[in-house]
Amino acid sequence: MSAVATRADCKPLRPAAVTTPSEAAVPRANHRWKVLGIGVAANACFSATFSGIPATAVFLRSGYHLSNGELGLALGLLGLGVALSELPWGLLTDRWGDRRVLLTGVGATAVWLLVMAALVVPSPAHIPSIALLAAALLVTGLLGGSVNGSSGRAIMAWFGEGERGFAMSIRQTAVPLGGGLGALVLPSLASVHGFAAVFGLLAAASVVSTSLAWRWLHQPPAHDDANSGSTALPAGPAPLRNLAVWRIATAIGLLCFPQVAVLTFASVFLHDFAGRGTAVISASLAAVQVGAMVMRVWSGRYTDRHGNRRSFLRLCSMLSVIAFTVLAGMVLLSATTQAPMLSPAIVAVLVVAGVCVSSWHGVAYTELATLAGASQAGTALGLANSLVFIAFFLVPIAIPGLLVLCSWAGVWLAAAICALIAWPIFLPSSDGRKSA
């Protein structure tokens, strides 16, 4: 064989075919923000459903001919559906992967909302029964429970420890974002066009979210798996056998009780007690959600830099105690003195209390997922959200009873007590583990 032929057959590899570690990291660095965007979109869509529908409570009550007790039952079953499904969806996420679970859950939610728009809306000729409405909202919750664990696990896979708090907090801004948009749009939409338009708009948003997940959500490259998961704390026992995971999940659930009181019955409180109209109610609830969004992003970045997640969670608990206690006192004073000038102040304090009790979620979920380990984050997040949505089930049912026993002052004082109980649970556990 000639030397020429030998040289021709042994051409060196072209430099362009060689991928350096820094070059390989570029797609991951860029794509992880798309994954985060998908998580935000999916959570915003479902938040617009489970927070936006309660914002239409006044129109639900009149349109479906409900009492306060029946209204609380219907809204409570929406939360119960999520509570029952969150843990199973989380377990499936760790087994099947986040892409499959998110596509299945959000896609099915879109289909179900379209069914509701066609069959479960009041009209001059027919008013759906409370049983039908409650069952429809229960199924909505069962399907929507897929969002939290699957999107959270995807973020844990794509982001490193030094930025997970920030990324998870951005994802958690989707909850007030969706809720704020729902509070701004859905009450007016329900009053003018009815609930077919409400459910149809929510279905369309879910279709868009499903399309984004289909296009961009996938597992990180194999060489990135170790990088994304290695910085998490060792997984240790399975999440359901991990006492530290149960502690944080329980505190998250307790601190959601006062938040749910604001989300589900603030519109009724502002209408019935403060005498406010649709514009003020929508603006107040939107202000709560916008304030929560800002605080969640800031708190994620702040606790990533200072490593003080537990301290921040305790601070949020105590500020919530103070805010709801002040609100209860102002309501009691207003009821006894009949002072109309207190009404604007009551609206303002309600907004402050709502922001205080809604600003901690990204930090808490990051702490929880870190304790469980990235590979088991779906189960841990599912456990927490099961407890969260137990609050969405119990609180709307309990509030009408509290109103009968001790009026709105008692409702807001009970919210303060729940936040106070959560405060010591956020203390570091005795095994010495501290937040990252």
Image (cartoon, grey):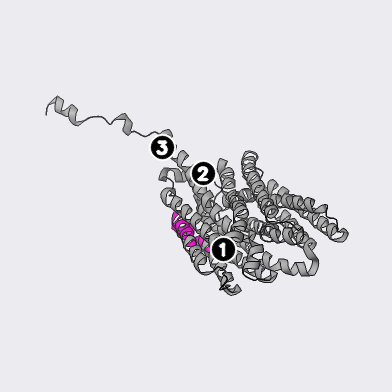
Mark 3 vs 1, N-terminal side: 3
* Mark 2 residue type: Phe
Q: How far apart are marks 3 and 2 (CA)?
A: 15 Å
Closer to us: mark 3 or mark 1?
1
Q: In this view, does 52 lie above or below 316?
A: below
* Mark 3 residue type: Ala
Question: Which quadrant would the C terminus be assigned to in this image?
Answer: top right
* Mark 1 residue type: Phe
Tell me if mark 1 has few (under 14), some (14-19) or many (20+) residues whose alpha carbon lies within 10 angstroms of its own: many
- Which secondary structure lies at badge 2? loop
- Relative placement, left or right, of 221 versus 170 is left
Disc 1: which residue: 195
Tell me if mark 2 has few (under 14), some (14-19) or many (20+) residues whose alpha carbon lies within 10 angstroms of its own: many
Q: Which mark is residue 159?
A: 2
- Which secondary structure lies at badge 1? helix
Identify the residue shown where x is 77% and y is 62%.
408
Q: Is the magenta stretch mostly helix, strand or loop?
A: helix
Disc 3: which residue: 24
Q: How far apart are marks 1 and 2 (CA)?
A: 39 Å
- Quarter where residue 298 is shown: top right
Front in this rendered view, residue 380 or 73: 73
What range is drawn magenta here?
A: 81-109
Q: In this view, does 405 lie above or below 94?
A: below
- Which secondary structure lies at badge 3? helix
Instruction: Locate residue 189, reporting x and y percent.
Output: 59, 57
Instruction: Locate residue 287, reporting x and y percent.
Output: 67, 48
Q: How far apart are marks 3 and 1 (CA)?
A: 49 Å
